[in-house]
Amino acid sequence: MAAGSLLTLLDDIATILDDVSILTKKAAAKTAGVLGDDLALNAQQVSGVVSSRELPVVWAVAKGSFINKLILVPLALLISAFVPWAITPLLVIGGLYLCFEGVEKLHHAFSHRHEKSEAEAGRDIAELAATTPEAKVESEAEKIKGAVRTDFVLSAEIIAITLGTVENQDLMRQFSVLSAIALLMTVGVYGLVAGIVKLDDAGLYLTKCRAAAQQSIGRAILWAAPYLMKTLSILGTAAMFLVGGEIVTHGIPPLHHAIEDVAHTAGALSIVAGPILNGICGLIAGTIVLLAFTGIQKMRGKTAH
C-alpha cells in the first residue's frame, strides 16, 4: 500500500513537471520578443561604466532583478486571484513610464548633440578626473537604480504574459511556470549583458596572445565592440517605445483593434506595421507624459517661490 502510494505520488510529480516544462516553453516563446528588448535595454543601461566596475554593476542590477521577480511572481498570483481587473491598469502605468523614459533619453540626446570643441572635451576630461570617489559611487548607484526600475516594468510585462499562458492551470503549475520563467529570464539576460559589456576586455586579451589568428580576432572584437554598444543603445531606446507603446495600446482596446486592423491591411509589411504603430503611440504617449511632468515641476517651482 505504501509503495503504491509512493509510486502514485511520483507519477503525479512527474506529470506536473512535464506540464510545467511544456507550459514554460510556451511562455518562453510568447515572451521572446520582450526578452530581446530586455537584453537591449539592460545592456544600454549598464554601458558607460568604468571597465573595472562593469561586472559589479551588472551583478548589482541582476540582484535587483531577482528581487523584482520575488515581488512580482507572488504579487501577480495574488492580483490574478483577487483583483484580476487591476492587471491592465498597472501594466499601462508601467508602459507609460517606459515611454516617458524613452522620450527623456531622446530629449537629452538631441539637446546635447552638438559637436564638442577641443576646449569643451578638455573640460569634460578634467571634470571626470576631478570627480571624487563618492560622486562616482553616487552616479553608479543612480545608474543601477534606473536599470532596476526599467527591469521591473519589463519583468512585470513578461510575468503578465506568462500568467496569461497558464491562467487555466492550478495554482501549483502557475507558480512553477512563473518561477521558471523568472529564473531563466534573469540568468539568461544578465549573463548575456555581462558578456556584452566585457567584449572589449576579451578583445584586448586576445590581441596580447601569441597566435596571429587570436590577435586578428581580438582586433576585430575591439573594432566591433563600440558599434555593438551603440547599436544596443539605439535598440534599447527604440524598445522603450515598442514595448511601452504596445502595453499602452493593449490597455486601450479600440486603439489596439485599430492598429491590428491597419496591420492586417499592410500585406507583406504586416509583421512590422504593428510594432511601428505601437512605437509611434509610445512616442506620443511618452511625449505627453514628459510635458505633463515638466509642467508639474514648473508649477511646483513657482509655488515654492
Image (cartoon, rainbow, N blue to C red):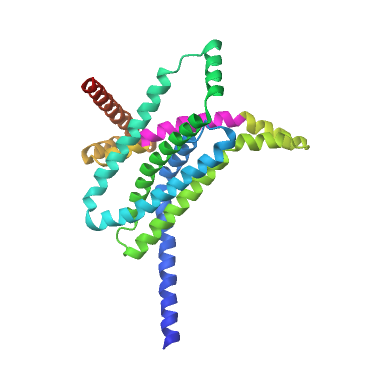
| Residue 197 vertical placement versus 24 (above, below) | above
Farthest residue toward the bottom? 1
Residue pictured at 44% horizontal, 44% vertical = 35
Q: For the stretch drawn in magenta, what is the main secondary structure? A: helix
Question: 213 left or right of 177?
Answer: right
The quadrant the N terminus occupies is: bottom left
Give, as a single range, the part of the protein colored magenta: 224-242
Q: 128 or 189: which is nearer to us? A: 128
Name the image quarter holding residue 33: top left
Question: On the rendered structure, is 122 left or right of 36?
Answer: right
Query: For residue 228: magenta?
Result: yes
Q: Does residue 215 show up? A: yes
Q: Position of residue 106 (x, y in %)?
A: 39, 25
- Compared with 124, 56 (above or below) is below
Q: Nearer the viewer, residue 218 or 270?
A: 218
Q: Which quarter of the picture shows residue 73?
A: bottom left
x then y, percent, for residue 138: 46, 33
